[in-house]
């Protein structure tokens, strides 16, 4: 039966929920807006036909921004504080480190205000996360950290710092636009002039929550379908990750039509507080029997482009199942077999060797694009991409849920070995994410 395809291709369930999420406003971790978005997602999953929709609360470190500024040469340059930056002011000689590759931090940076770009060069073998660059600067003795967007358009980037053990960072950290960064580099990069970074913020204990719901038979084993509800406070969070949560709701609606075909329970989880250190997924993974999870389909970045793409983390069986979906629908889906340690599937992969997809989409560009800036708004996305992706991912989940679909697991040692082989391990140790 293929009636579900027609229904999904004309559905507004997911897109309507995306509009609901972006209209909530601030969905920052631990905020009232995040709570409202979680409640709306719980209700949307229930309306789509999923059962036992509920919230699971956990403690989180709240962070609220105030005003921030970069002062240099008698000027004030616009910036955004990076979430979980400490409050305070730091002054030091300005040092533009370009891309901020590991070797760029080898010089004398003691007391300096360090600036790095948000991207890496094409020739470099791996992506370097913002937090790795921040903690390399901290280790090198920098007094403050300036994160420069590589995307033009006067858009300062955001993104958290902090570690699992110490949620608040060590030195003030701000994001500046590509244009402000170019101005700072031109005027102060070679002059040895003092630059001051000032951050005003507040932080303290708060409560976040994960959203849960299920479909299918009451089996011991489950297939997880996941996203995150929270978003950075500076924009609508449409792309990151309202779209992923909208996809989960659309998948629940489609899978409810195919529930008789499900041979394994499907467990929907929409996490809280992903943007400040994968807090919701780490909390859930820490209290769950990871052996009971057959596979994870994590939706984060699914509407950045029209063609779906997925990290498969070296699980060949996941690649094969996804390839069979692409062949059935004669529709392109790309895969990356390497490790992708920067979204909510990762605590399960690292801790328990759980087979997981990180489903995103192709953009043809480096980095986040509009993501993590004020430009992450609904008008950048297309409803057709949501519907097409939902058809493909619905079929993927049904195939994963089949009893005859077997997916070999990996040990933690094998995952760590892959991280070492691919060059990720050193960076994860710098940020405290790989003890």
Image (spheres, grey):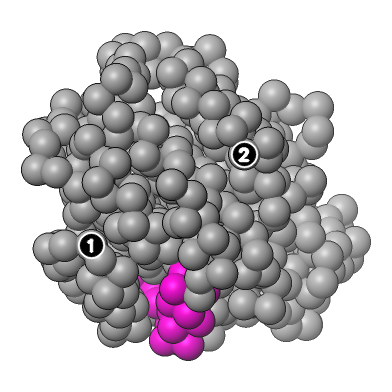
Q: Nearer the viewer, residue 416 or 55?
A: 55
Magenta span has 326? Answer: no
Q: Is residue 358 left or right of residue 166?
A: right
Magenta-colored segment: predominant secondary structure? helix
Disc with the residue nearer the chain's start (1 vs 2): 1
- Magenta span: 13-30
Q: Quadrant of the C terminus?
A: top left
Q: Is residue 312 left or right of residue 34?
A: right
Tell me the residue that label 2 is attached to. Answer: 329
Q: Is residue 401 left or right of residue 415?
A: left
Q: Nearer the viewer, residue 295 or 229?
A: 295
Q: Position of residue 84 (x, y in %)?
A: 40, 64
Q: CA distance from mark 1 to mark 2?
A: 26 Å
The answer to whether residue 343 shows anywhere in this view is no
Magenta span has 17? Answer: yes
Q: Position of residue 47 (x, y in %)?
A: 27, 74
Residue visible at 23% across and 62% down?
50
Tell me the residue that label 1 is attached to. Answer: 50
In the rendered view, would you say 201 is above or below 192? below
How crowded is the residue under tag 1: few (<14 C-alpha within 10 Å), some, or many (20+)? many
């Amino acid at each position: 039966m293929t009636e579900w395809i027609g229904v999904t291709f004309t559905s507004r369930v997911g897109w309507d929920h995306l509009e609901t999420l972006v209209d909530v406003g601030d969905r920052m971790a631990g905020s009232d807006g995040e709570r409202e978005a979680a409640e709306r997602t719980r209700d949307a999953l229930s309306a789509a036909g999923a059962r036992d929709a509920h919230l699971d609360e956990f403690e989180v470190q709240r962070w609220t921004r105030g005003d921030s500024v970069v002062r240099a040469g008698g000027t004030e340059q616009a910036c955004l504080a990076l979430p979980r930056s400490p409050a305070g002011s730091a002054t030091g000689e300005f040092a533009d480190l370009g891309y901020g590759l590991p070797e760029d931090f080898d010089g004398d940076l003691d007391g300096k205000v360090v600036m790095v770009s948000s991207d890496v060069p094409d020739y470099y073998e791996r992506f370097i996360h913002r937090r790795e660059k921040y903690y390399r600067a901290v280790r090198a003795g920098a007094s403050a950290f300036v994160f420069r967007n590589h995307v033009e358009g006067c858009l300062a980037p955001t993104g958290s710092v902090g570690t699992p053990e110490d949620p608040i960072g060590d030195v003030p950290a701000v994001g500046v636009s590509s244009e402000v960064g170019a101005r700072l580099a031109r005027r102060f990069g070679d002059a040895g002039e003092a630059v001051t970074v000032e951050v005003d913020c507040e932080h303290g204990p708060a409560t976040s929550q994960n959203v849960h719901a299920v479909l299918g038979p009451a089996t011991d084993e489950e297939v997880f379908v996941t996203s995150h509800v929270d978003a950075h406070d500076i924009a609508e969070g449409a792309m990151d990750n309202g779209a992923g949560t909208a996809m989960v709701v659309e998948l629940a609606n489609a899978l409810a039509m195919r529930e008789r075909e499900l041979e394994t329970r499907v467990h929907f989880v929409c996490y809280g507080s992903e943007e400040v250190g994968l807090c919701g997924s780490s909390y859930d993974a820490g209290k769950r029997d990871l052996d009971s999870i057959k596979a994870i389909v994590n939706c984060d970045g699914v509407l950045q482009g029209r063609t779906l793409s997925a990290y498969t983390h070296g699980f060949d069986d996941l690649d094969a199942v996804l390839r069979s979906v692409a062949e059935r629908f004669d529709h392109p889906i790309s895969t990356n077999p390497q490790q992708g340690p920067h979204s909510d599937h990762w605590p399960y992969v690292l801790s328990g060797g759980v087979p997981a997809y990180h489903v995103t989409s192709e953009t043809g560009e480096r980095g986040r694009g509009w993501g993590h800036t004020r430009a992450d708004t609904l008008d950048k996305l297309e409803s057709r991409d949501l519907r097409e992706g939902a058809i493909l991912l619905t079929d993927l989940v049904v195939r994963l849920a089949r009893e005859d679909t077997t997916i070999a697991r990996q040990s933690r040692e094998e995952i760590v070995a892959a991280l070492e082989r691919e060059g990720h391990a050193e960076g994860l140790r710098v940020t405290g994410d790989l003890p």
